[in-house]
Amino acid sequence: MTTLLNALPQTSLNPKLDLAWVRSQFPSLSRVINGQRAAFLDGPGGTQVTQSVIDAISHYLKTSNANTHGQYATSRETDEIIYGARSAMADFLGCDSDEIVFGPNMTTLTFAISRAIGRELGPGDEILLTQLDHSANVSPWQALEERGVKIQFVDIGEEDCTLAMDDLARKLSPRTKVVAVGYASNAVGTINDVRAIVRMAHDAGALAYIDAVHYAPHGLIDVRDLDCDFLACSTYKFFGPHMGVLYGKREHLKRLRPYKVRPNTDEAPGRWEMGTLNHECLAGVTTCVDYLAELGGHSSQADSRTSDEGVQPALGIEPKGRTTRRDLLRSAYRAIQSHERDLSLRMLRGLSDIPGLRLYGIADPARVSYRCPTFAIRIDRRHPAELAKQLGERGIFTWDGNYYALNLTERLGVEHDGGFLRIGFVHYNTEEEVERVLGELRSLI
Ligand SMILES: Cc1ncc(COP(=O)(O)O)c(C=O)c1O
């Protein structure tokens, strides 16, 4: 099977992550469990939040708590909060504010889009999904089977858990109306070549729906460059509050018909937002994007302190003109990726030395940029839940099971037996934490 992947950009000009500054922004990182500093290796399930996010949420509730579109100060402030969050997420995803829809989480937003698209589908139509995806990008589409829509699945290469692109090409046809695929796997960390997949979907006349929930904390997303029709993510996976965010091309958000209540606006994007939004969390959404932008500024400063004279600053920022929030986000993600690559390489090296351990997903250090720092493992005769519990008692937070990547655990034959132990790193994790979890795994076997 041929596989094609979207490597993280490799550059020697990456700005350096200011890790001390990063960790000082997250109050929970100083928690102590059973006398040991907590190691949050559960980022794929949800990341920690910065003090600035906590402050923004409580400030909104203290000062501006109201419903929208009223003729008084707190209501106008609430409108501004929503406007600000749309603008922040537009910078985050590389689109315009009116292409951003908020909802309680990615799953709910995906059901809203699948129901609306489903209104126009019936027998003879097909939807292409993958064995690698989280159920949130599977079940909403599978629900359309009751309308007579046929669901197909792209298989994986079992040896490294990458998508079988030849299988994808084979299953695409003029009958395919939607291709729904993850940007990166929340279970095994594979990064898919979504740009190529979007192109293939469009060539077949299908819409492309991207689940970027797992990718968002690890890499900069550019929806214009991907040319996807929809892309969904969740801010609680990238250092913000529990909220879902959907990008939709303006033409689709206007043309498709959502299920909505009559008095709600029929203008996009508001027509896709059911009922009252979580305003306090929207205040936190802007702040988590601003945190990443600030990190970009910090990283570039750290970089310019350490770089040689004459070396071009690694910002991706135009030397002329104003530095935008998007520029700073680009810089932040370069620093994040460089740091996460170091963590991954150390982890891959360490895991390969542990007898009886099997890593699912890309294991070759030379292909490290084709994966996120998310590691799914099993150890001979040890149940993943038991390992996770023992690590948890030592202050190391990991996950066990299928984490809703249910097709994958079934496909790999591990569902009946506890799934995987998942160890996930994000940019606030340290090399010392990598060594610590490796040491504990060695001692547990
Ligand atoms: C890859 C992926 N997609 C979708 C989801 C669902 O996101 P939400 O909880 O926002 O519905 C998750 C949650 O873990 C995920 O990891």
Image (cartoon, grey):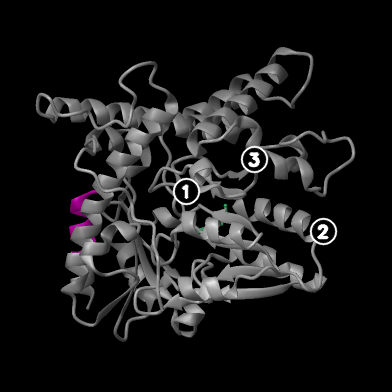
Q: Secondary structure at mark 2?
A: loop
Q: Nearer the viewer, residue 99 or 177?
A: 177
| Marks 1/3: CA–CA distance | 15 Å
Residue type of the residue flagged with mark 2: Arg
Residue visible at 30% across and 40% down? 334
Q: Does label 3 or label 2 sit earlier along the sequence?
A: 3
Q: Secondary structure at mark 3?
A: strand
Give the x, y percent position of residue 136.
60, 61
From the viewer's perspective, tell me whether residue 105 is left or right of residue 190: right
Judging by the rendered image, the residue that carries numbered circle 3 is: 102
Judging by the rendered image, the residue that carries numbered circle 2 is: 119
In this picture, which residue range is highlighted in magenta? 430-438
Q: Which of the 4 quarters of the picture holds residue 441?
A: bottom left
Q: Does label 1 or label 3 sit earlier along the sequence?
A: 3
Judging by the rendered image, the residue that carries numbered circle 1 is: 237
- Ligand 1 closer than 8 Å to the CB at disc 1? yes
| Marks 3/2: CA–CA distance | 22 Å
Q: Is residue 77 magenta?
A: no
**Pointer 3 local density, CA inside 10 Å: few below 14, some 14–19, many at least 20:** many
Which callout, 3 or 2, points to the residue nearer the camera? 2
Residue visible at 50% across and 46% down? 236
From the viewer's perspective, tell me whether residue 235 is left or right of residue 308: right
